Amino acid sequence: MIPIVAPVFGLFRRFGAALRRGWAEPDFRGWLYLVSLVVASGTIFYRAVEDWTWVDSVYFTVITLTTVGYGDLNPTTPGSKIFTIVYILIGIGLLVTFIERVARYAAEEHAAKRATRRNRKDQD
């Protein structure tokens, strides 16, 4: 199990670097705020309407927006089902766009580090 730790740690490090790089861009911050608002609104909705716990509400929100959909929680009221349909149609597009931005910043960060290493190697 130890050999898995290093790649996972590297993945989290790259994700953090991508977020730091993106944070400098107002457009990226806007997308982050929008995705946070969508997740928060879904969580609050399911907490209020379905009377789920906060953890279950955020859990359902995340597995719904990421299209995992384990099926262990389901909306039970017609209003919740309609909300979920609209929520999926809006939320998935927003989340995919945000993830694309994070991936782009991660790729740019990786390319910049490779260029720096290449320049150092060429200077030696």
Image: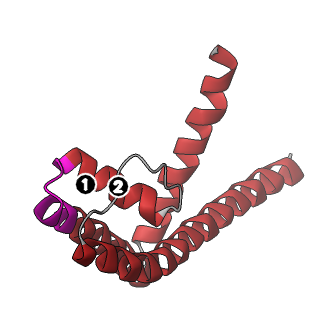
Name which residue type carries label 1. Ser
Q: Residues within 10 Å of mark 2 (few under 14, many from 20)?
A: many
Q: Is residue 58 visible?
A: yes
Position of residue 13 in the picture relative to residue 114 (left or right): left
Q: Are marks 2 and 1 in contact (CB under 8 Å)?
A: yes
Which of the 4 image quarters holds residue 10? Answer: top right
Secondary structure, mark 1, is helix
The label on residue 60 is 2
Write the residue at 40% across / 46% down.
72
Q: Is residue 20 at all visible to an observer of this figure?
A: no
- The residue that disc 1 covers is 57
Based on the picture, tell me whether residue 71 belongs to the magenta stretch. no
Question: In the visual, does 23 lie left or right of 120?
Answer: left
Verify whether residue 50 appears in magenta.
Answer: yes
The segment highlighted magenta reads 44-54
For the residues marked 2 and 1, what is the alpha-carbon distance in whole angstroms?
A: 5 Å
Left or right of 40 on screen, residue 51: left
What's under tag 2, amino acid-wise?
Phe
Q: Nearer the viewer, residue 70 or 39?
A: 70
Kind of element beneath mark 2: helix
- Assess disc 1: are there few (<14), some (14-19) or many (≥20) residues with their C-alpha within 10 Å of its C-alpha: many
Residue 19 coordinates in the image, percent (x, y): 46, 61
Question: What x and y, as percent, mark residue 122?
Answer: 88, 53
Identify whether 97 is placed above or below 47: below
Which mark, by number, is residue 114? none
Q: Quarter holding the C terminus?
A: top right
Give residue 103's quadrant in the image. bottom right
Secondary structure mostly seen in the magenta stretch: helix
The quarter of the image holding the N terminus is: top right
At 54% from the left and 73% from the top, the residue drawn is: 96
Residue 40 coordinates in the image, percent (x, y)? 23, 66
